[in-house]
Every structure is written in structure tokens, then in C-alpha cells.
Image (cartoon, coloured by chain):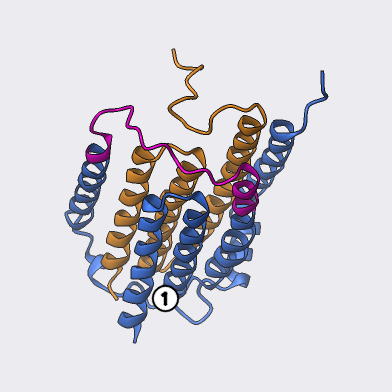
Chain colours: A blue, B orange
């Protein structure tokens, strides 16, 4: 059962990722990314990270993707021009991606971490639930929590400054 | 499923995202590919957190999510500003800052 769920979600995540890269229209790219994010949420649930999965669906697949859809609709999802300014980019980029994957796989499989071959540590039913995460976030990691809240505020102000309509001069 | 599978899947997703950034020219699609790479990192973090049996990796994944949201907001603001000035939405044409 777990294997079926894993391979289904992995196929969905991979298909969504390939769709983002391959689809020509940005609007369909955004839709493919939503499929990818939902599949990742299933994988997070399999890894007993319930709160992260919920945040993924609500924050990412909900709010952030709506922002993308709005901007694509505003800008008008124009298709990219066909011309190739860098010769051979179409072949070099997949080659580079494949090389990166091979290199990362060698690093992972060669790391000889014994715990890789297991299902992970045996964790209790409360692992990754909102109570545990919130306790960690507000006690042990209070400073990163506050720093990320300031970062969010700065990003909101920056977006307003960047995208605000200038006075007609 | 072994933890290995999750980590290899995350590296595969990361490679696909990196390939997209090299391949595409629309800034919106480049931002989408950045999201792919950040999410691949998140998957690895959560997988390692399960491997060690420690929730701190999940807290780190949440912070990565916050950083990704900030990056999206600023990036989309830039795209809207570029569009308002009637400049082409193509990263190869926007080369004024190139040295």
C-alpha cells in the first residue's frame, strides 16, 4: 500500500515537474506545478510530516499559485519566441540536468549512511503534528521564526514598491 | 519505502528544475522552476527528518517555504514592473545590467 502511494505520488511529482519545464504556455506550467505540489504533499504525509503537508497545500498550492495565476492572466501568457540565442542550448541544458542528477545520485548512494536502507526511525503517532512543530518553532527556533516574519514583511513592502503604479509624469 | 528512494526522487526533481532554468526564457517559467528546486530541497529535508526521527528538519522545511513565498512575491512584482514599462518579458532581452 505504501509503495503504491509512493510511486503514484512520485510519478505525479515528476510529471508535474517535467510539465513545468516542457509546456510552452506559462498558464499550463502553473497548472502542472499545482499537480506537482499536491503530489509532494502526499509524499510529506507518507513521511509523517502532517503539518508540513497541510502548509504545502494551503500556503503553496492555494495562496502562492493563485498569485501566479493572477500575474499570468495580467501579463498575458505569451508564448516564448522560438529563436535560440545561445547555440546548442536546447541540447546542452538537458545534458547539464542529467549530469547534475548523476552527480547527486553518486553523492547520495556513495555516502554510505546506514539509515538510508531503512524506513527511518520509529516515531510515535505525534511526530510532525502541529503541536510538536509549534512548540519547536516558538521555543527552540524563536529567532529564525521572528526573522522569517520580518522577511515576509519586507517582501510585502518590496512588492508594493516594485509593482505600484507610478504617477503619470 | 526506504529513505533512499525519497532522497533520489528529490535529487531528480532538483535536476529537472535546474534544467528548466537553463532552458526557458520567460521569467515566469524561470520562477516556477525555482519553486521546483526549492520543493526538491524541502522533500530532502523532510526525508532526513524522518530518517533521524527528529522534527527539526520539518521546521526547517517550513522556513524554506516562507523564503520561497518571499521570493515569489518579489519576483512577480518585478515581472509586473517589467510589463508596465512595455519591456519584453524575455530574460535574454533584458541585458541592461550586464557588465
Q: Is residue A75 magenta?
A: yes
- Where residue A160 appears, x then y in whole percent? 74, 37
Residue B82 sits above or below residue B98 on the image: below
Which corner quadrant of the image does residue B52 belong to? bottom left
- From the viewer's side, name the closer residue of B83 and A8: B83
Which corner quadrant of the image does residue B39 belong to? bottom left
Residue B22 sits above or below residue B92 on the image: below
Q: How many marks?
A: 1
Split into 4 quadrants, where in the image is the C terminus of chain A?
top right
- Where residue B1 appears, x then y in whole percent? 29, 76
Residue B73 sits above or below residue B60 on the image: above
- From the viewer's side, name the closer residue of A137 and A163: A163
What residue is rendered at 48% in x and 63% in y? A37
What residue is rendered at 35% in x and 67% in y? B51
The residue marked by circle 1 belongs to what chain?
Answer: A
Q: Residues within 10 Å of mark 1 (few under 14, many from 20)?
A: some
| A38 relative to A102 in the view: left or right | right
- From the viewer's side, name the closer residue of A64 and A20: A20
- Where residue A163 appears, x then y in whole percent? 70, 35
- Which contiguous range is marked in magenta? A67-91
| B86 relative to A115 in the view: left or right | right
For label 1, the SS is helix
Q: Is residue B94 magenta?
A: no
The furthest residue to the bottom: A1
Split into 4 quadrants, where in the image is the N terminus of chain A?
bottom left
- From the viewer's side, name the closer residue of B92 and A100: B92
What residue is rendered at 40% in x and 53% in y? A23
| A168 relative to A65 in the view: left or right | right
User: Mark 1 sits on what residue?
Assistant: A46
Which corner quadrant of the image does residue B43 belong to? bottom left
What residue is rendered at 30% in x and 28% in y? A86
Amino acid at each position: 500500500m505504501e509503495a503504491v502511494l509512493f510511486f503514484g505520488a512520485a510519478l505525479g511529482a515528476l510529471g508535474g515537474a517535467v510539465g513545468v519545464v516542457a509546456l510552452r504556455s506559462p498558464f499550463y506550467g502553473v497548472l502542472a506545478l499545482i499537480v506537482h505540489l499536491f503530489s509532494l504533499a502526499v509524499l510529506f504525509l507518507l513521511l509523517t510530516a502532517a503539518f508540513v503537508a497541510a502548509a504545502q497545500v494551503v500556503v503553496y498550492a492555494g495562496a502562492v499559485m493563485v498569485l501566479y495565476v493572477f500575474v499570468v492572466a495580467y501579463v498575458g501568457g505569451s508564448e516564448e519566441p522560438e529563436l535560440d540565442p545561445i547555440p546548442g542550448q536546447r541540447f546542452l541544458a538537458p545534458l547539464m540536468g542529467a549530469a547534475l542528477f548523476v552527480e547527486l545520485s553518486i553523492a547520495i548512494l556513495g555516502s554510505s549512511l546506514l539509515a538510508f536502507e531503512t524506513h527511518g526511525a520509529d516515531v510515535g503517532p505525534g511526530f510532525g503534528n502541529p503541536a510538536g512543530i509549534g512548540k519547536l518553532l516558538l521555543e527552540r527556533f524563536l529567532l529564525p521564526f521572528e526573522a522569517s516574519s520580518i522577511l515576509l514583511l519586507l517582501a510585502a513592502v518590496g512588492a508594493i514598491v516594485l509593482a505600484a503604479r507610478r504617477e503619470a509624469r | 519505502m526506504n529513505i533512499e528512494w525519497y532522497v533520489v526522487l528529490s535529487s531528480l526533481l532538483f535536476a529537472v528544475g535546474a534544467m528548466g532554468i537553463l532552458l526557458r526564457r520567460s521569467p515566469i517559467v524561470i520562477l516556477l522552476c525555482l519553486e521546483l528546486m526549492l520543493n526538491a530541497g524541502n522533500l530532502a529535508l523532510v526525508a532526513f527528518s524522518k530518517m533521524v526521527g527528529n522534527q527539526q528538519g520539518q521546521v526547517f522545511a517550513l522556513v524554506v517555504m516562507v523564503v520561497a513565498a518571499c521570493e515569489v512575491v518579489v519576483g512577480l512584482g518585478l515581472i509586473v514592473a517589467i510589463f508596465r514599462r512595455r519591456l519584453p518579458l524575455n530574460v535574454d532581452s533584458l541585458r541592461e545590467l550586464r557588465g
